[in-house]
């Protein structure tokens, strides 16, 4: 598992959603701050470190990741990158079991997460951890991995 850090958004476009909040059209410039549990995404080419946008994709189409959990970090002061990543790993591993139907340790699936940076914490009051599930056996998945039990 590896984490990506959120950065401030510039130039991101609004993601089209239906009345239930489901992504209906591909958006190559979806803000990381618009991620919702149940959304499916592709990462920017060669993404490591900080990202501002992802490609939002209807889950019925091939995609690299699916948002399966989110949580807020408590506190007024940024706890530091290492502490934020530790909390993200704990949150994502804990939520993984109920989402997949199998513990992370037993699963062939993996996850990554998006977390605040010092900058987004201070400037945007960002406290959100977003957990994204992936399948390392294949570049893309079609449909949801909820209940995959693998």
Image (cartoon, grey):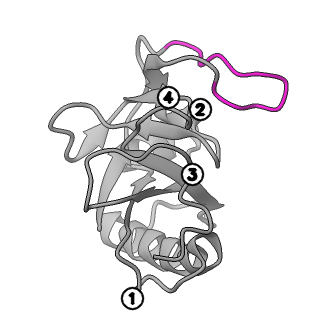
- The dot on residue 34 is 2
Instruction: State the image quarter where residue 120 is shown.
Output: top left
Position of residue 87 measured from the top left corner of the image (x, y, whole percent): 47, 74
Are the two marked residues, 3 and 2, in contact with CB atoms closer than 8 angstroms? no
- The dot on residue 105 is 1
User: Which residue appears at 60% of the width and 79% of the height?
Assistant: 101
Question: Is residue 18 highlighted in magenta?
Answer: yes
User: Which residue appears at 39% of the width and 76% of the height?
Assistant: 86
- Asked whether, in this view, residue 29 is left or right of residue 129, the answer is left
Q: Which residue is mark 4?
A: 57
- Which badge, 3 or 2, is on the more N-terminal residue? 2
- The dot on residue 85 is none
Disc 3 to disc 2, how far (Cα)?
Answer: 19 Å
Q: Callout 2: few (<14), some (14-19), or many (20+) C-alpha neighbours within 10 Å?
A: some
Disc 1 to disc 2, how far (Cα)?
Answer: 29 Å
Disc 3 to disc 4, how far (Cα)?
Answer: 12 Å
Are the two marked residues, 1 and 2, in contact with CB atoms closer than 8 angstroms? no
Magenta stretch in the rendered image: 13-23
Q: Callout 4: few (<14), some (14-19), or many (20+) C-alpha neighbours within 10 Å?
A: many
Disc 2 to disc 4, how far (Cα)?
Answer: 13 Å
Q: Which sits in the foreground, 85 or 70?
A: 70
Q: Which residue is mark 3?
A: 144
Q: Which sits in the foreground, 1 or 49?
A: 1
Quarter holding the N terminus is bottom left
Instruction: State the image quarter where residue 29 is shown.
Output: top left
Disc 4 to disc 1, how far (Cα)?
Answer: 28 Å
């Amino acid at each position: 598992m590896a984490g990506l850090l959120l950065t401030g958004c510039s130039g991101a476009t609004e993601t089209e959603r239906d009345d239930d909040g489901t992504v209906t059209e591909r958006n190559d410039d979806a803000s990381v701050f618009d991620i919702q549990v149940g959304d499916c995404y592709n990462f920017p080419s060669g993404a490591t470190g900080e990202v501002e946008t992802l490609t939002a994709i209807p889950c019925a189409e091939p995609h690299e990741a699916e948002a399966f959990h989110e949580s807020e970090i408590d506190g007024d002061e940024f706890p530091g990158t290492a502490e934020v990543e530790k909390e993200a790993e704990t949150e994502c591993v804990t939520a993984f079991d109920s989402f997949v139907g199998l513990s992370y340790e037993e699963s062939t699936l993996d996850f990554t997460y998006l977390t605040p940076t010092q900058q987004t914490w201070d400037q945007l009051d960002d406290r959100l951890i977003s957990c994204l599930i992936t399948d390392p056996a294949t570049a893309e998945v079609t449909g949801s991995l909820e209940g995959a039990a693998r």
